[in-house]
Amino acid sequence: MTTETAVERITREMSDDVDLVTEKVNDLAIVDQKSFDVTTEFMVQLQGRLKQVKKHFKPMKEATQKAHKAIVAQEKAMLAPLNEADAHLRYIRAAWADAQEEIRRKKQEKMDKAADLAAKKKEERLREKAEKETDPEKKADLEEQADNTYANPNIASGGVDKSSKVEGGGSTSWIEDIEVEVTHPLELLEEIISGRVPQTVYEFKPAKLKAWVKANDIKIGQIPGIMIKKTRRESVRTG
């Protein structure tokens, strides 16, 4: 049988006391001034228990935090060179992929221009034949062929594969995405107001709004679009 340590015993006794006090509080009801005064006593008792519990666990939390910080520092030191190596690999691979994509793009442009030119020449030949053709039916057929002459689709080879598998397991994939930066907040807000941009893209920060309202002594109804409601909370001091 494991022997209970002093800290474990105090923790257990404190937990039992907390259960007892909270059970009493949950059974309370206010029906008159006397019962209201009783709840005042329990308010103070609860604050006292809160302080006791926090004080009891504080040294244990601090010890755990120190151990956690040491472990995090160790992990950070070990991860740093790996993250740097990963960033280096990503950089040189992205640079290579971009260069190969540029080569492929130029090749595609060249192929598209050649296909467009070939289609244009074919169309011109067909129209020339149509102009010289005296048979109405054949003439109409040639004109229709000319109207339906399009460049043959071509897909240039090159670039890098979208995904690569590694022998023994594992793979990499190129994922196309975008980056969005707000350069003119007021202009964006105007777009939101107009309805062209949904309001969901903008997040109001209630804490900062409340701080501004209090600091500037903003009154109820003074600023359109916000509602100010007075609240009240009870402050408790233990003996």
Image: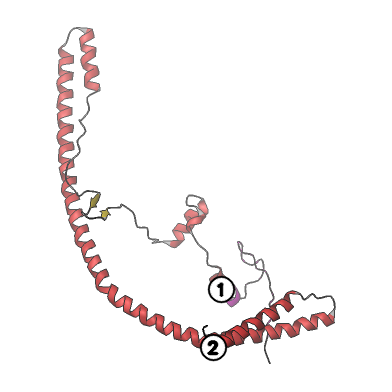
Quick one: 39 or 193, which is closer to the camera? 39
Please tell me whether mark 1 sits on a helix, a strand or a loop. Answer: helix
State left or right for residue 148 relative to residue 103: right
Residue 99 screen position, x and y as percent: 17, 54
101, above or below 206, in the image: above
State left or right for residue 146 relative to residue 177: left
Dot label at residue 103: none
What count of labels does the image hold?
2
Dot label at residue 212: 1
Residue 196 screen position, x and y as percent: 48, 49
The amino acid pointed to by label 1 is Trp
Q: Residue furthest top?
A: 135
Is 63 inside the magenta-drawn segment? no
10 Å crowding of disc 2: few (<14), some (14-19), many (20+): few
Please tell me whether mark 2 sits on a helix, a strand or a loop. Answer: helix
| Magenta segment boundaries in residue numbering | 210-239
Residue 107 screen position, x and y as percent: 15, 43
Quick one: 101 or 9, which is closer to the camera? 9
Query: Which residue corresponds to the image point at 23% horizontal and 8% vertical from the top-left?
Result: 137
The amino acid pointed to by label 2 is Val
Can residue 50 be seen by looking at this rendering?
no
Quick one: 59 or 228, which is closer to the camera? 59
Can residue 198 be seen by looking at this rendering?
yes
Quick one: 104 or 160, which is closer to the camera? 160
168, above or below 106, in the image: below
Query: Which residue corresponds to the image point at 21% horizontal and 21% vertical from the top-left?
Result: 146
Residue 118 screen position, x and y as percent: 14, 29
State left or right for residue 66 relative to residue 111: right
On-image quarter of the C terminus = bottom right
| Sequence order check, earlier mark of 1 and 2 | 2
Q: Main secondary structure of the magenta part?
A: loop
Q: Determine which residue is flagged by label 2.
A: 7
